């Protein structure tokens, strides 16, 4: 191989090496870009799932609070009814005693 052939071979090899490096760089950029896009999709999906879970938790909490409030209202109404009955009984007893005192006086 002559000196000129050796130089041509070196130039070809360097050109081939540059092409390989350029192709590898382009491929690496493509992989990075795809990875970023995939990471963004995953982040968006995770955010959407978290939002759905948050809404479900809030819905359940609201339903539970409403059920507890309804139960509390029922219990309060029962207590009030009990006090009304006691009050009416005591009122009737007081009226009876007052009438008895008036009649016996």
Image (spheres, rainbow, N blue to C red):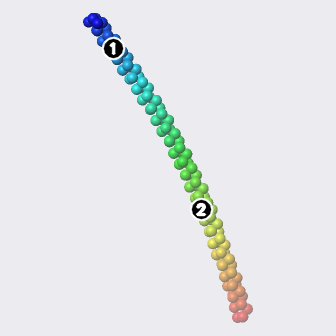
The residue under the point 66% across, 82% down is 90
Camera-nearest residue between 32 and 1 = 1
- Spot the residue most to the front: 1
The residue under the point 64% across, 75% down is 83
Can you give x and y, in whole percent of width and height, for residue 51 in the image?
Answer: 53, 45
Camera-nearest residue between 89 and 73 = 73
Element on which disc 1 rests: helix
Camera-nearest residue between 54 and 5 = 5
The residue mark sitting in front, 1 or 2, is 1
Q: Which of the 4 image quadrants contains residue 97?
A: bottom right
Camera-nearest residue between 2 and 11 = 2
Check the picture and name the quadrant holding the N terminus.
top left
Crowd rating for badge 2 (residues with CA inside 10 Å; few <14, some 14–19, many 20+): few
Q: CA distance from mark 1 to mark 2?
A: 81 Å
Can you give x and y, in whole percent of width and height, for residue 48 in the image?
Answer: 53, 41
The residue under the point 70% across, 94% down is 105
Q: Which residue is mark 1?
A: 13
Give the numbered dot on residue 68. 2
Q: Which of the 4 image quadrants contains residue 100?
A: bottom right
- Spot the residue most to the right: 103
- Spot the residue most to the bottom: 105
Give the numbered dot on residue 57. none
Q: Which of the 4 image quadrants contains residue 21?
A: top left
The residue under the point 34% across, 11% down is 12
Element on which disc 2 rests: helix
> Does 82 sit left or right of 16 as displayed?
right
Can you give x and y, in whole percent of width and height, for residue 68 in the image?
Answer: 59, 62
| Image position of 20 with respect to 45: above or below | above
């Amino acid at each position: 191989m002559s000196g000129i052939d050796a130089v041509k071979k070196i130039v070809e090899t360097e050109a081939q090496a540059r092409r390989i490096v350029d192709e590898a760089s382009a491929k690496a950029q493509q992989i990075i870009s795809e990875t970023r896009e995939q990471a963004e999709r995953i982040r968006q999906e995770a955010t959407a799932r978290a939002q759905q879970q948050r809404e479900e938790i809030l819905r359940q909490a609201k339903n539970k609070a409403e059920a507890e409030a309804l139960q509390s209202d029922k219990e309060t109404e029962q207590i009030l009814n009990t006090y009304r009955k006691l009050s009416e009984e005591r009122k009737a007893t007081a009226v009876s005693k007052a009438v008895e005192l008036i009649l016996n006086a």
